[in-house]
Image (cartoon, grey):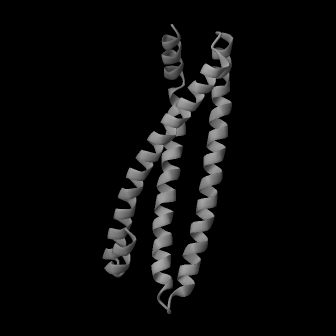
């Protein structure tokens, strides 16, 4: 009985799950790409003539990472507010608080882990694509290959 209720609840909240999942995946992709750019900045900073470019890249990476972390936090809070109605409904149906806590933890863990995996896969493709584009634009391949 409880499984049927949970399945119906999942189907009715599919849009919320998808928004949460897509946002978390995009944030992981952005974070992954920014770590790639920070590696490029580190390699570039070893060169004397373009050290100001490296400091600009570092500053941009730090700003984007901070925005990403704040965005992830806001997404989690928004998701909890949207799902609070469903959690209250389950509590009214008599689900024990420990079971509700376990349900919330499993829901977040599975959604976040799947989003991280998809984000890392998408980030890998983005990094390889960016490295290929930068290589075609004339950047030195040894710098890019050391970063990938």
Can residue 16 be seen by looking at this rendering? no
Q: Residue 114's x, y, as percent?
A: 44, 40
Quarter of the image with the C terminus is bottom left
Tally the marks. Answer: 0
**Image point 59% across, 62% down: which residue?**
64
**Residue 115, visible in the rendered structure:** yes
Q: Is residue 38 above or below residue 10?
A: below
Establish if 55 lies above or below 97.
below
Left or right, residue 62 beside residue 119 = right
96 displayed left or right of 128: right
Percent across and percent down for residue 88 are: 68, 19
Identified at 56% across, 67% down, the residue is 61
Looking at the rendering, which quadrant does residue 81 occupy?
top right
Q: Position of residue 51 (x, y in %)?
A: 54, 86
Furthest residue to the front?
A: 98
Residue sitting at x 64%, y 9%: 93
Furthest residue in direction bottom, as rendered = 49
User: Is residue 119 positioned above or below 112 on the image?
Assistant: below
Residue appearing at x 54%, y 25% in the figure: 13
Quarter-of-image position of residue 100: top right
Percent from the top left, x then y, of residue 102? Answer: 58, 26
């Amino acid at each position: 009985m409880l499984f049927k209720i949970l399945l119906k609840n999942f189907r009715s909240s599919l849009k919320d799950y998808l928004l949460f999942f897509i946002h978390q995946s995009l944030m992981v992709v952005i974070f992954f790409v920014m770590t790639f750019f920070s590696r490029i900045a580190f390699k570039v900073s070893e060169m004397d003539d373009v050290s100001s470019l490296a400091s600009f890249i570092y500053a941009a990476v730090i700003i984007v990472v901070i925005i990403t972390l704040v965005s992830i936090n806001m997404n989690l809070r928004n998701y909890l507010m949207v799902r609070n109605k469903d959690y209250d409904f389950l509590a009214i149906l008599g689900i024990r608080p420990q079971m509700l806590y376990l349900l919330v933890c499993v829901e977040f863990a599975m959604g976040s882990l799947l989003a991280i995996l998809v984000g890392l896969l998408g980030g890998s493709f983005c990094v390889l694509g960016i490295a290929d584009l930068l290589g075609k634009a004339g950047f030195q391949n040894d710098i890019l290959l050391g970063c990938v």
